[in-house]
Image (spheres, rainbow, N blue to C red):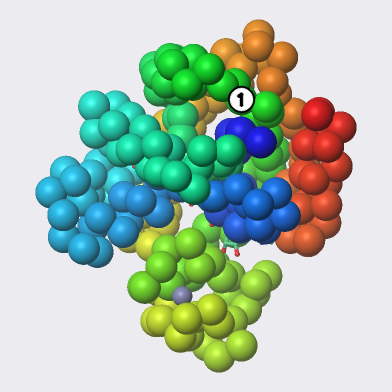
């Protein structure tokens, strides 16, 4: 399957993507995680992306689209993928359509995670991620690691993301509403959007998402 996951910052996209990708045997491709990996490795791409991310703005399309396409071209993504955080505006969605068309394949669904803003703020405020791999995500009350400050998966140190400060979160939410939400209408005209509530326990949301995706097939 080829799936796009969409939802506001802190909706639980990364958390759900890890389980959904495993259940569906497809790779989880997160542009946020790819940028963070580049930043921690000190690459040129990471250096270009960092200032935009720290300010809560989108990284320019010229950088993002190439990086996402390169990742989708890897052999593990040949038969499907779960995109998390890409596309994030209409021009990225159009670029994705062109790339898929060139490969003669189509998206199966766009899974839209709906969460009220006050819940998003609570989820982001308590989020802690792993220094070694930013796809290892925890929460100080909702998803506690076994040992405080230590990643259950790899033993890495847990920390708070630089862009999780209150001001930057406010900016990221504004960017979501103005630039990312329009892609939901874009995909709605293609009949691809499945909206689910992302409230409740993590496994309840995963079950809801799996049901919605099965219903969609
Ligand atoms: P990105 O990393 O994609 O951030 P985001 O979209 O803002 O999403 P988040 O990672 O904040 O949240 P999430 O929905 O994954 O939630 P999570 O599962 O962690 O992007 C960061 C930046 O990179 C952007 O601002 C931009 O600058 C740049 N960028 C990335 N892609 C780009 C693109 N395509 N174009 C341009 N720029 C781009 O969950 C949040 C917390 O809640 C966690 O602590 C988790 O444990 C907890 N939680 C999850 N589910 C539940 C639940 N059901 N109940 C209780 N707690 C829960
Ligand atoms: Zn880890």
Q: Residue 66, how many percent across, how many down?
A: 29, 32
- In depth, the one of 45 and 52 nearer the eye is 45
Q: Which image quadrant is residue 18 in?
A: bottom right
Q: Residue 55, how many percent across, how many down?
A: 28, 44
Q: In this view, does 190 lie to the left or right of 63?
A: right
Residue found 70% across the figure and 38% down from its top? 114
> Which residue in the protein does label 1 denote?
107
Residue 80 vs 15, above or below: the answer is: above
Q: Residue 49, how many percent across, how many down?
A: 23, 44
Q: Residue 89, how many percent across, how many down?
A: 43, 23
- In depth, the one of 105 and 167 nearer the eye is 105
Visible in this render: residue 129?
Answer: yes
Residue found 82% across the figure and 56% down from its top? 204
Residue found 13% across the figure and 49% down from its top? 44
State how many labels appear: 1
Residue 72 vs 105, above or below: the answer is: below
- In depth, the one of 13 and 78 nearer the eye is 78
Disc 1 within 8 angstroms of ligand 1 (CB): no
Q: Which residue of the protein is positioned furthest toward the bottom in this rendering?
A: 147
Q: Quadrant of the N terminus?
A: top right
Q: Which residue of the protein is positioned furthest toward the top in this rendering?
A: 189
Q: Which image quadrant is residue 172 in?
A: top left
Visible in this render: residue 7?
Answer: no
Q: How crowded is mark 1: few (under 14 residues within 10 Å), some or many (20 or more)?
A: some
Residue found 52% across the figure and 88% down from its top? 148
| Secondary structure type for disc 1 | loop
Q: In which quarter of the image is the C terminus?
A: top right
């Amino acid at each position: 399957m080829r799936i796009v996951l969409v939802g506001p910052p802190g909706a639980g996209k990364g958390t759900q993507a890890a389980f959904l990708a495993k259940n569906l045997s497809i790779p989880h491709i997160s542009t946020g995680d790819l940028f963070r990996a580049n930043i921690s490795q000190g690459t040129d791409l990471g250096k270009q992306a960092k200032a935009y991310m720290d300010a809560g703005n989108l990284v320019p399309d010229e950088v993002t689209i190439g990086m996402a396409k390169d990742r989708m071209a890897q052999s593990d993504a040949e038969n499907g993928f779960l995109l998390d955080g890409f596309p994030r505006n209409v021009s990225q969605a159009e670029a994705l359509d062109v790339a898929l068309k060139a490969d003669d394949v189509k998206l199966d669904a766009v899974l839209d995670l709906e969460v009220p803003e006050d819940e998003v703020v609570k989820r982001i405020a308590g989020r802690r991620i792993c220094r070694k791999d930013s796809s290892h995500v925890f929460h100080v009350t909702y998803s506690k690691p076994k040992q405080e400050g230590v990643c259950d998966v790899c033993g890495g140190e847990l920390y708070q993301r630089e862009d999780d400060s209150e001001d930057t979160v406010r900016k990221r939410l504004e960017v979501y509403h103005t630039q990312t939400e329009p892609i939901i209408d874009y995909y709605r005209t293609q009949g691809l959007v499945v909206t689910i509530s992302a409230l409740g326990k993590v496994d309840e949301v995963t079950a809801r998402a799996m049901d919605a995706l099965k219903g969609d097939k």
